Image: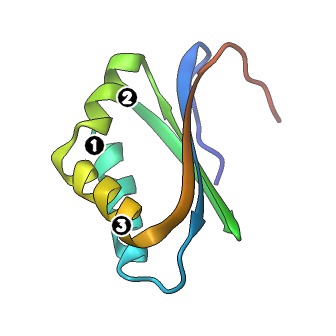
């Protein structure tokens, strides 16, 4: 599903990853993180796709909202588990969306 974001500007956190073999609780935690992020002030939406390479883009009102999400206690546990159990490689990028359009 395509996120219904407000008019720009806003911010995007782009998380790109390569997974380890097996689920190891990943699916449940990924669902929990989306639900938890949606409760955070400044959250605007999320889009995710996985076909070998996983890409999740979450949208945020401002940099302070992104920082608060990064420091969320449950999210910190997921980050640590990701490093130890779920990902062989990952990269996080934060970008300011200056313009968006579509149909």
Number of residue marks: 3
**Circle nearer the viewer, 3 or 1:** 3
Which residue is nearer to you in this view: 48 or 39?
48
Residue found at x 40% / y 18% = 63
Residue found at x 59% / y 57% = 17
The Cα atoms of the two marked residues, 3 and 2, are separated by 23 Å
Residue found at x 30% / y 57% = 80
Screen quadrant of the C terminus: top right
Screen quadrant of the N terminus: bottom right
Q: Secondary structure at mark 2?
A: helix
Which residue is labeled 3 in the image?
84
Q: Which mark is residue 39?
A: 1
Which residue is nearer to you in this view: 97 or 45?
97
Give the farthest residue toward the bottom: 22
Label located before the other in sequence (3 or 2): 2
**Circle nearer the viewer, 3 or 2:** 3
């Amino acid at each position: 599903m395509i996120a219904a974001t407000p008019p720009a500007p806003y911010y995007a956190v782009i998380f790109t990853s390569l997974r380890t073999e097996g689920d190891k609780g990943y699916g449940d935690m990924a669902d929990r993180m989306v639900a938890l992020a949606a409760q955070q002030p400044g959250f605007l939406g999320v889009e995710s796709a996985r076909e070998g390479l996983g890409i999740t883009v979450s949208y945020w009102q401002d940099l302070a909202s992104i920082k608060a999400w990064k420091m969320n206690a449950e999210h910190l546990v997921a980050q640590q588990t990701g490093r130890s159990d779920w990902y062989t490689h990952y990269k996080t990028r934060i970008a300011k969306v200056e313009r968006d359009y579509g149909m």
